[in-house]
Image (cartoon, rainbow, N blue to C red):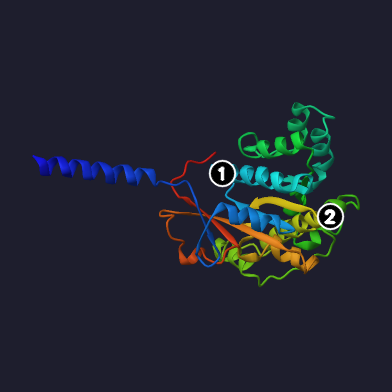
Amino acid sequence: MIKKIILIITLGIFSLTAFSQKSAFKLYTADGSEADYTSLVESSVSSDIILFGEHHNNPVCHWLQLELTMDLHKEIGDSLVLGAEMFEHDNQVILNEYLNDKISARSFKGQARLWPNYETDYKPLVEFAKSNGLPFIATNIPRRYAAMIASEGFSGLDSIDKQAKDWIAPLPIPYDAQLPGYKKMLKMMGRKKANPNLPKAQAIKDATMAYFILENLNEEQVFLHFNGTYHSNNYEGISWYLKEYEPDVQITTIATVEQENIEVLLDKNKKLADYILVIPENMTKTY
C-alpha cells in the first residue's frame, strides 16, 4: 500500500513537471545554442535593421513581433521605425493618412489592400505605431508589378508608367540567379512546372523591400521589418539586397521554423539567421 502511494505521488510530480515545462517557442542562435529573449532585444537595439522572418499564419510570430516592438520602443523610443512586407508602397500615403488621423479606420481598410489576416496579425503593430507616433513603412512592391515579372521577366516593367517606378527599387536591380533560395524555388516547382521568372518576381520584392527600408532609415534609428521568413532566410533575399545597397549596414535576422520537438534545433534549421524562433508544429494557426 505504501509503495502504491509513493508510486502515485512520484507519477503525479513527474506529470506536473512535464506539463509545467511546455513552451510555445524556443530561441536559438545560428549555431544551435539556446538563446534568451533578452539577448535578442540587446542585439536588436545595437543593429540598424532587424528582419523578423515570420510564418504568416503563426500566432506566436505575431505575438513576439508585438512584444519585440514594445520592448524596443521602451529602449529607444522615437528612434524606432516599423515596416512590413504586408503593405505595398503605393499605399504609403493611405497608411500615413491613417497613422496621422486624417482618415478613418474604415477608409483605411477599404483602400489599402490589406491582407485577409490584418485584423488579427498586423493591426496590433499598426495601432502601436499610431498610438506612439512611429513611422510605419509600406516596403513591398505593388503586387501587380511582381506579377508582370512572373509572367514576362524583368522586361515586363520596361513599359510601365514613370510614376509607377517610384514604387519599386531602382531598375535594373542587381540579380543573382544562383542564390540558393532562388534556385530552391525552381526546384520546388519541378522541371515541368518551373517558371524561370518566378525567382525574378521574388527578387524584385526583396530588392524593393530592402530599398525602402534604407530610404526610410536615418542615422541613430533602428528599423524593425516584418516579412515572410523565406524573404530573409540564410541571409539572402532582403538581407542580400541590403548589403548590395549598403555594405556596412548592421542587420539582425530572425527566422521562424516549426519542429515537432523544440528542445533541440535541427541541423537543417541551423544558420538560417542570427536568431531562430522555433515553434511547435502543432501550434494553432490564425488562418
Q: Which residue is mark 2?
A: 218
- Mark 2 lies on a secondary structure that is loop
Hey, which quadrant is residue 42 in on the image? bottom right
How far is the residue under mark 1 from the one under mark 2?
31 Å
Residue reaching furthest front?
A: 2
Residue 174 visible (yes or no)? no
Name which residue lies at 58% across and 42% down.
63
Hey, which quadrant is residue 195 in on the image? bottom right
Residue reaching furthest left?
A: 1
In this rendering, the label closer to the viewer, 1 or 2 = 2
Which is nearer the eye, 164 or 127?
A: 127
Q: Is residue 66 above or below residue 185?
A: above
Residue 206 in the image: state x and y as whole percent: 72, 58
- Mark 1 lies on a secondary structure that is loop
- The mark nearer the N terminus, 1 or 2, is 1
Residue reaching furthest bottom?
A: 178
Q: Is residue 102 above or below residue 254?
A: above
Q: Is residue 67 above or below residue 254?
A: above
Residue 75 in the image: state x and y as whole percent: 70, 48
Residue 40 in the image: state x and y as whole percent: 61, 55
Is the residue marked by circle 2 packed among few (<14), some (14-19), or many (20+) residues within 10 Å?
A: few
Name which residue lies at 65% across and 65% down.
235
Q: Quadrant of the C terminus?
A: top right
Residue 10 in the image: state x and y as whole percent: 22, 45
Q: Which residue is mark 1?
A: 57
Kindly identify the amino acid type of the residue bearing the numbered disc 2. Answer: Asn
Hey, which quadrant is residue 210 in on the image? bottom right
Residue reaching furthest right?
A: 162
Name which residue lies at 12% across and 42% down.
4
Kindly identify the amino acid type of the residue bearing the numbered disc 1. Answer: Asn
